[in-house]
Amino acid sequence: MPKLVFLISVVLFVSSCVTPPPNNQGNLCAVFDQYPKWYDYAAAAQEKWGTPKQTLMAFVKQESSYRSHAKPPFKWFLVIPLGRGSSAKGYAQAQNPVWSEYENERGALFRGRTDMKDALDFIGWYNHRTNKRLGISKWNPKEMYLAYHEGHGGYRSGSYNKKPQLLKVADKVAKTSDAYGTQLATCEARLRCRQWYKFWPFCS
């Protein structure tokens, strides 16, 4: 009985540490108002890698619905669990092999797929490689998402052309990015200059 109580306590403690998804995922200003540090993380990733903030956040919305510990669902054969469809995990749904590449290049210390700062940096890093390897503009969210989903080899082979549902999802990501960009234009100055020490001419 004491062991059961301990396990329940651990589960409750871990659950309390998980950041809940934003209340209004359809409005990027509302997302950043609820979690202001996310704006800072997106801004840092854009400055480092070049993918616009609205596209970074549109990727996260599509991949995980802003759930920090999101994983693919279990596959079943009748009542027998066969495991998850992939090793994807976290806000960006990064899989083990490419996350290992990211860690090796960026440094593994204290990086995690359940951390929004690292997830946005990962997406920016991957999209930067996509731009270098495939020539896709970082301002083209649809094609960037197709390369993100299929991998660079899959994109080169045109594998997405045989996946009509994926093409619809990529269109959805592009529309979300466009909407997010329009929304962000109305609130970015406030978000960027929200700290007391950020004032003109040091913040504009």
Image (tube, grey):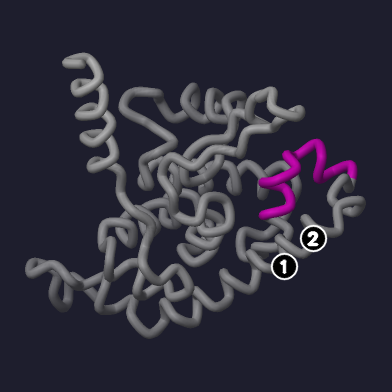
Circles 1 and 2: CB distance less than 8 Å?
Answer: yes
Count of numbered tags? 2
Residue at image mark 2: 167
Q: Residue 97 sits in which quadrant?
A: top right
The residue located at (61%, 59%) in the rendering is 138
Front-most of 169 and 72? 72
Out of 43 and 115, give the one closest to the viewer.
Answer: 115
Specify the quadrant that holds the C terminus: bottom left
What residue is at 60 percent from the left and 38 percent from the top? 72
Q: Position of residue 82 (x, y in %)?
A: 69, 23
Where is residue 158? Give x, y as percent: 89, 48
Residue at the far bottom: name it.
186
Question: Quarter of the image containing the N terminus?
Answer: top left
Which residue does the image show at 24% across and 41% down from the upper left? 17
Q: Residues within 10 Å of mark 1 (few under 14, many from 20)?
A: some
Q: Amino acid at mark 2?
A: Leu
Would you say the magenta stretch is mainly helix, strand or loop?
helix
What segment carries the magenta color? 145-157
Residue 130 image offset from top left, x and y in percent: 67, 45
Mark linked to residue 109: none
Q: Residue furthest front?
A: 1
Residue 150 drawn in magenta: yes
| 132 vs 75: above or below | below
- Name the residue at 54% across, 62% down: 58
Judge whether 113 appears above or below 49 on screen. Answer: above
Crowd class of label 2 (few under 14; some 14 to 19; many from 20; radius 10 Å): some
Mark 1–mark 2 Cα distance, whole angstroms, equals: 6 Å
Q: Amino acid at mark 1?
A: Asp
Q: Which residue is mark 1?
A: 171
